Each structure stands twice: as structure tokens, then as C-alpha cells.
Amino acid sequence: MPHSEHVAIVDDDANMRMALTRLLRTHGIDARPYPSGVAFLAALPEAKPYCIIVDVHMPGMSGLDLQRKLLKLGVHIPTIVISGLSDEDVAATARRLGAIAFFSKPMAGEALVAAIAAAQKPG
């Protein structure tokens, strides 16, 4: 399944999705927002991003649950995990599940854009 040229933003907070979408588009990055992991998975067959930004704490399917589901499906997409809480155990779990970065909200836009740029590099 080929990657398309966009970043998926998976966060249940509409204001955060809008802010991240705006930030990325300001940097010339095509961003597509999703209100939940379920909504993202439903769009996945047609629109596989080159990177995912996912919130940890969401109702239903958490960001960590989404990471686990993608691994179970054999889908490997660089993932950046964000959280309103700074929790080293959650950050460590996210990294074990393959996250390339973990940021506590609010995060520096430049650092997030740099992590996305790193996700685009082959290898």
C-alpha cells in the first residue's frame, strides 16, 4: 500500500486538530485531521500517510491502542505521540510500540515539524 504525501492528525480535541492542521499547513505540509483512531483506520486503505500524529488520551481507542492495532495489521507508519500529561511510562510504551517521538502538550511547533521531517527520511 503506497504512502500518500500527507500527515494524519488523530486527536479527539477539535481545537488541537485545527491548531496542528494549521501549523503543518503553514509549513507546507499536507495535514488531514481525524477525530478518533477508528475514523483514521476507516480512511487508512485509501489514504495511507507518511506520518501520524496521535494523542494518547482519547475515548474509545487511545493513541497507544491505535499503535498496537497498526502493528497487528502490519502497517508501519512513523508515529509521533502527543499527550496533555507528561508521563515517562506512557512515553516509554509509545516508543516500544514504534513511536519516533513523544511530545507533551503544548509542544514547540518547530520540534514537531522537525520530527515530521525526520519521518520522511528513508531508512
Image (tube, grey):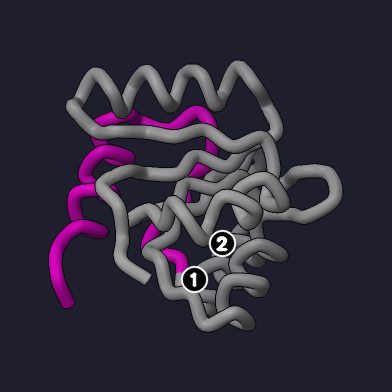
Disc number placed over residue 91 in the picture, else none: 2
Q: Does 85 sit left or right of 76 as displayed?
A: right
The crowd level at tag 1 (other Cα within 10 Å; few <14, some 14-19, many 20+) is some
- Which residues lie in the magenta part? 99-123
The quarter of the picture where the C terminus appears is bottom left
- 49 shown above or below 65: above
The amino acid pointed to by label 1 is Arg
- Work out whether residue 86 can be spotted: no
Q: Is residue 101 magenta?
A: yes
- Work out whether residue 85 can be spotted: yes
Question: Depth check: 47 or 75 in front?
Answer: 47
Q: Does 87 sit left or right of 80 as displayed?
A: right
Q: Is residue 122 magenta?
A: yes
The residues bearing labels 1 and 2 have C-alpha atoms spaced at a distance of: 6 Å
Disc number placed over residue 95 in the picture, else none: 1
Question: Depth check: 65 or 4 in front?
Answer: 4
Q: Residue furthest front?
A: 46
The crowd level at tag 2 (other Cα within 10 Å; few <14, some 14-19, many 20+) is many
Disc number placed over residue 61 in the picture, else none: none
The quarter of the picture where the N terminus appears is bottom left
- 52 shown above or below 84: below
Q: Secondary structure at mark 2?
A: helix
- Residue at x 58% of width, y 42% of height: 10
The amino acid pointed to by label 2 is Ala
Image spot of residue 11 (x, y percent): 62, 37
